[in-house]
Amino acid sequence: MVNEFEMVSRLLMAAALGSVIGFERERLSWAAGLRTHMLVCVGSTLIMIVSAYGFQEVLNNSHVVLDPSRIAAQVVSGIGFLGAGTILLRGEVIRGLTTAASLWSVAAIGLAIGGGLYVPAIAATIIILVILAGLKPLEGKYFAAKVGREFHLTARRGALTLLHVNRALGVRSRLVRQFVVQSHAAPEEKDEITIAFTRLSISDATLVREQLLAIPGVDEVIEADQTA
């Protein structure tokens, strides 16, 4: 049985380690930031302490057997509800998965601290911080980000329809979010078309532009400066 000073020390350590990860999320202005991560880490630490040491008097009675991991196990599944609240769906773009994962990881750190596993808790905090902050620049450098893109086209009257786009783009046609055709009154005027895509990488955008230009009657394809 650990003393009360040790329990308080574990709670303070949980707040400190949770704040390290929470600060990185707060820096990016996510909803689950500094205070949320600290609360999750401290709360899970307290739950672990209660789970491990809160039933000592009951265990002194004969014929009483308790599983000390039962309460702590509920944190693993229960934290999922809090993480789900940080996930946002904007169109077909999902945001907040990393923050949800960081909350789940912080809960695990809290359980480790509550169980007295200080070295694994500190090591996990460092590793998670490297993943969140250190790998992000590398991810942006070596993996082309997929963002919403918009193309402005000019084409011969009636030469470009959504059916033509679907045939030209194949499977990428499912990424078309908006297709707008503006026709002028004069027959000799060309159609002005705007095609917006949900998510395209740089390489995909180049290929889509070439495929659109290859459609008979399309004269010009210009990508607008847009992100989503």
Image: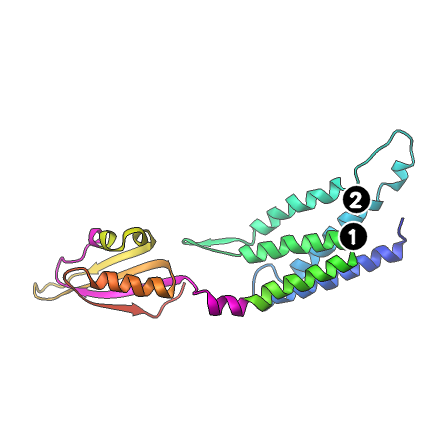
Q: Residue furthest front?
A: 142
Q: Is residue 49 left or right of residue 29?
A: right
Q: Which residue is mark 1?
A: 114
What is the span of residues highlighted in magenta in the rendered image? 136-164
Q: How many marks?
A: 2
Which labelled disc corresponds to residue 51?
A: 2
**Considering only order in the chain, which callout, 2 or 1, is on the residue closer to the N terminus?**
2
| Magenta stretch contains residue 159 | yes
At x 57%, y 60%, the residue is 31
- Residue 56 coordinates in the image, percent (x, y): 88, 41
In depth, the one of 171 and 1 nearer the eye is 171
Establish if 143 lies above or below 92: below
The answer, for residue 25, to whether it is visible in the render is no
The answer to which quarter of the image holds residue 208 is: bottom left
| Magenta stretch contains residue 132 | no
Q: Is residue 213 left or right of residue 200?
A: left
| Mark 1–mark 2 CB contact (< 8 Å) | yes
In the structure shown, which secondary structural element does the residue marked by tag 1 occupy? helix
Q: Is residue 130 left or right of residue 43?
A: left
Which labelled disc corresponds to residue 18?
A: none
At x 34%, y 70%, the residue is 225
At x 54%, y 67%, the residue is 136
Quarter of the image that includes the C terminus: bottom left
Alpha-carbon span between mark 1 and mark 2: 9 Å
Q: What amino acid does circle 2 point to?
A: Ser
In depth, the one of 48 and 185 nearer the eye is 48
- Residue 160 coordinates in the image, percent (x, y): 18, 57
At x 75%, y 53%, the residue is 112
The answer, for residue 62, to whether it is visible in the render is yes
Q: What amino acid does circle 1 point to?
A: Gly
